[in-house]
Amino acid sequence: MWLSIAEIALLIILPLTIFFQRSGWQPKSYIPAILLLYVIWYLSYAFLHEASHLLGVWVTGTKVEGYQLIPHFWKGDFSTGYIRSVYDSKSDEFIVVIFAYLRDLVFLTAGYFILKRMNTTRTLLTGLILVVFILSPVYDIIDNYLAFLVGAKNDFNALIVISNKFTVHTIGILMLSYSVFISLAVVKQAGIIRQTVKK
């Protein structure tokens, strides 16, 4: 519980705050936006992750036995999402598992270029793009890989069963490195947005 709170604070709230401060926006403008954006992130995160696995299922033609795209908040479940499938081969399972993280890489790349081309002073729109296309994928990659490293059962455990430790760690380290690189590039980009706001 406390680890999740710390990860959300470090990977979602803190980067949003830094981005808005470096962009020259005032706290009265960005604090309400951050609260709203947190709710949007929380409600969309599991859906985007599990829907990406479901897309992998569709691509491979794998049979779905069951799925839950969002946690059942109304039942007190705030973390469970899953896709349960029967795989014909290890390669099908690998594709289904990795699709969520390929979506993260696509979103990160698209988000960087969208933010780079944006010329707006609208805090909420910029923040929404930042959360959906940058911070949510960063959180997904870092949270899942680090949780795997400390022994949690997740997608990276499934990958290690399908392939091997070297492959899984290579994938994890490369994705983690790319997500950090894009995040730093976006924070640096905030200086350009600040110049636009001042004009």
Image (cartoon, rainbow, N blue to C red):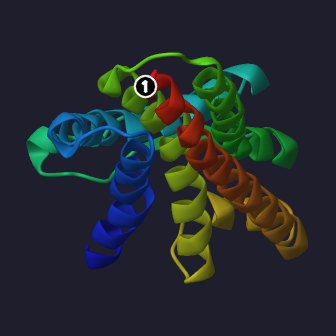
Residue 103: x %, y % from top left: 66, 34
Tell which of 173 and 82 is nearer to you: 173
Residue at the location (89% across, 73% down)?
Answer: 166
Eyeballing the image, is 149 above or below 44?
below
Residue at the location (33% across, 63% down)?
Answer: 9
Q: Is residue 68 visible?
A: no
What is the number of callouts on the image? 1
Residue at the location (55% across, 83% down)?
Answer: 150
**178 sits left or right of 100 in the view:** right
Q: Is residue 101 visible?
A: yes
**35 sits left or right of 164 in the view:** left
The residue at which mark 1 appears reads as: 197
Residue 121: x %, y % from top left: 38, 21
Which of the image's four quarters has the N terminus?
bottom left
Eyeballing the image, is 4 above or below 22?
below
Residue 110: x %, y % from top left: 67, 26
